[in-house]
Amino acid sequence: MNRKLFDYVERHNFIYDLSGVTKFLCFMIAGAAVMFTYDIRVMVLVFLVSMAAFLMSQITFRQIRLMVIYVAIFMVMNILLTFLFSPQYGVEIYGTKHVIFTITERYTLTWEQVMYQGSKVMKYCAIIPLGMIFILATHPSEMASSMNRIGIPYKATYALALTLRYFPDVIRDYQDISVAQQARGLDMSRKEKLGRRIKNVINICVPLIFTTLDRIELISNAMDLRGFGMHKKRTWYCAKKLTVADFLALGICIALLLLSIAMIVFVNHSRYYNPFI
Amino acid sequence: MSDKKPLVTFRDFSYQYFAQAEPTLHHIDLTIYEGEKILIAGASGSGKSTLGHCINGLIPFSYKGESQGSVQIKGLETKEMSLFELSKIVGTVLQDPDGQFVGLSVAEDIAFSLENQCMPQDEMKELVQKTAGIVDMDGLLNNSPFELSGGQKQRVGLAGVMVDNVELFLFDEPLANLDPATGKTAIDLIDKIKTEYNKTVIIIEHRLEDVLYRHVDRIIVMNEGRIVADMDAGALFEAKILPPLGIREPLYVTALRYAGVEVTKDLHPESMDTLAIDKVKDAVCRWNAAQPAPKPRRAREEILSGTDLRFAYNRDQDILKGIDFSIEAGEMVSIVGTNGAGKSTLAKAICGLVRNVRGQFYFEGNDISDLTIKERAQHIGYVMQNPNQMICKPMIFDEVALGLRLRGVPEEEIREKVEAALKICGLYPMRKWPISALSFGQKKRVTIASMLALNPKILILDEPTAGQDYYHYTEIMEFLRSLNESGVTILIITHDMHLMLEYTAHAIVVTNGKILYDGSSVHALTTAKIAESASLKLTSLYDLAVACGIDDTQGFVENFINYERSLRESERSGVREA
């Protein structure tokens, strides 16, 4: 039974020991670095750095399997749809046309299109490992504090912590209610017609909403009684102090961002790197 | 008392919630002094929780209503303070140890209040470590709430207010969610706070006997929004204030009354340890000897049994490790044991609510192991602890009819069956009411009625009386008893030793996924070995019997129960005749 929202596994290595703030900032900065540019060289570099970080983190494939499947489905859809709707966009951007093969006149695959779509895929590939690191290698307790420290109001980030805390409770309530209703004859299996099944889910949701509302009243009382929201700021028990390693990681990411900007401004004079001229 | 400084003072204080038609508190005058240990007792709806809210500041800051008179804490009017200022003086440990656990780990939850006060991290870590040590949780700082027992969560809740160095601790029904043995340690811990750290302690609880196991300075008894008694335990028992109010006196006190002993202050009846046993011994022995021998029970046919039941949620953790049991038709059985022992899982396995259970179930001699949840529900009904988790229709009739409608029973027949079920549950006059108009106990009956409509031969109830005061407890249990007399076999999962003793002759004690004991409830609760290993608590009747030199402790407890039952029955028939 999956009772926790994220499968956090305690490990100790360079990446895990970084502060949550660093991981979050690195994700954002590196994200910015590949956001604007279509220079595949920059993106490959960012990809290599983030893959290296990912390998260093020792996160296992089992932990990310589901996420990888979703991302892969998303990317394949993205590739197909882009080609379907704008098969000649690459030609437009790069200004040349090197045909690989022709299906119809409109759907002619060109090296330019491959370059354009390849760059787009690379954008995601470069940034996803860093996102996974933030989600999987940051202790759940540290997430709220990390996001608060870069300026998001603590009341908002604490909502995230509360979600992590109470999500499994709500799931358990759902399971309890669901079995109790099944005992009364509610069929949740595929044997039942879809319309009926949706109606049956409502029969589970009504009690779930009421028990959850009760829980919310209790939690907000518990928080009020211990002074939540007293000051504009709050400190965090779990926040990690920044170390040399954090500054090193941040330095690398900032360097990548600067490189990306420099390539746009001084080398390519545009967001695109054009190998065809 | 005059040399003591008052900490909390109520002066002619009345309070009415905006949502309610009647005031909840009427003209309260009450002073609580520094260093006192106070028990506030009262039936549900007596206003004891509201009184607690007025002390910790949830009234007036979180709940809205109208008040008259004054509430002062350390000489300041609470309504002129803020909830935060108050939280530095009054620390509250709420009833539900799970819901109030806000942090993702033990350490974070203890630190929660300090974080809100912007305490620097180093200081915070030191203080958390120290405080966790006081409640014996320092070895589990990084554990998540899912890995803790109810008692441990409550300790964390306590530590979470201790870090603030508050002067007054307010415990809102601290025993409600704990098994008996854990409850006993909780009371010990509260006592330690009072004596070692010299704090003021207020406990709101209706389970008097369990709280009085450690000394309490004063007991304040609430009834219908008023304070009806404010005295020490001895005087309270002497004045016989509790029985008419729906609050249960300790069992040994009741036993003394049955034995014809005039319970006075001088006997020191506040706990078994202080009781002047020599003065009551003879009377108790005389009474015991005069009781008629109980009628032998006749054996009945088996209705449900299980053989070698095994179950695991995942591979490394077996929840049920080979359980065999047998239930006779028409029995009332309690399933008891520590939290996580597997008793709830066993009940769910019987109903088919958990899958992949290995072993065989037999119902009236037929193997039902392969039947689905829905099919088993025709024979065995399951009633959850919290009725809010079961009710999903706005109207009573529809709620009770739901199971039949889902089975496609013709509407004519549904009406007949639902009305019959409602009559049994005493809800027939309310059949057209919306559910929202019902009290907790009535909602419980609705959930039972919705099971009865399916005409099961067995009902399984999960903690039917949790959080109920003696009056409502009796109401629910007497109802179940009458149901049982009409032929329904009843299985109850419970923590409540009184319930087990009074209502269920047969007990199944589950520990660690196995059956530790299967037999007489009285025997289980008068045998130290069984009680200890299942985190049960020996009844105080046992202690009384031992103290009086009665050898047959089991017989004494049985006599008590039979005597009490005969009293209740003659009372009931008296009411009927009048």
Image (tube, coloured by chain):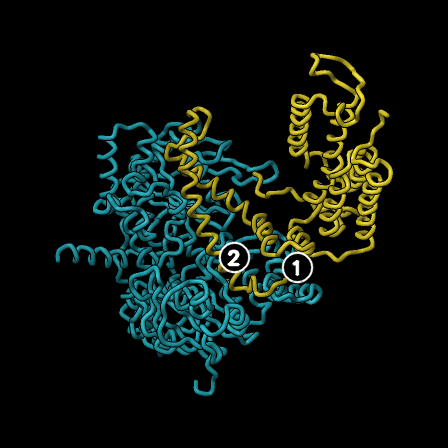
Chain colours: A yellow, B cyan
Q: Nearer the viewer, residue A23 or B408?
A: A23
Residue found at x 32% / y 35%: B402
The x and y percentages for residue B333 are: 37, 45
Q: Is B418 left or right of B160, judged from the image as shown?
A: left
Instruction: Determine which residue is flagged by label 1.
Output: A236
Q: CA distance from mark 2 to mark 1?
A: 19 Å
Q: Nearer the viewer, residue A236 or A75?
A: A75
Q: Which chain does the residue under circle 1 lie in?
A: A
Q: Is residue B245 visible?
A: yes
Residue found at x 55% / y 56%: B101
Tag shown at residue B100 = 2
**Quadrant, the N terminus of chain B:** bottom left
Secondary structure category for the residue under label 2: loop
Name which residue type carries label 2: Gln
Tag shown at residue A188 = none
The x and y percentages for residue A252 are: 83, 46
Residue found at x 54% / y 76%: B198
Do badges 2 and 1 share one subunit? no
Q: Is B149 left or right of B348, judged from the image as shown?
A: right
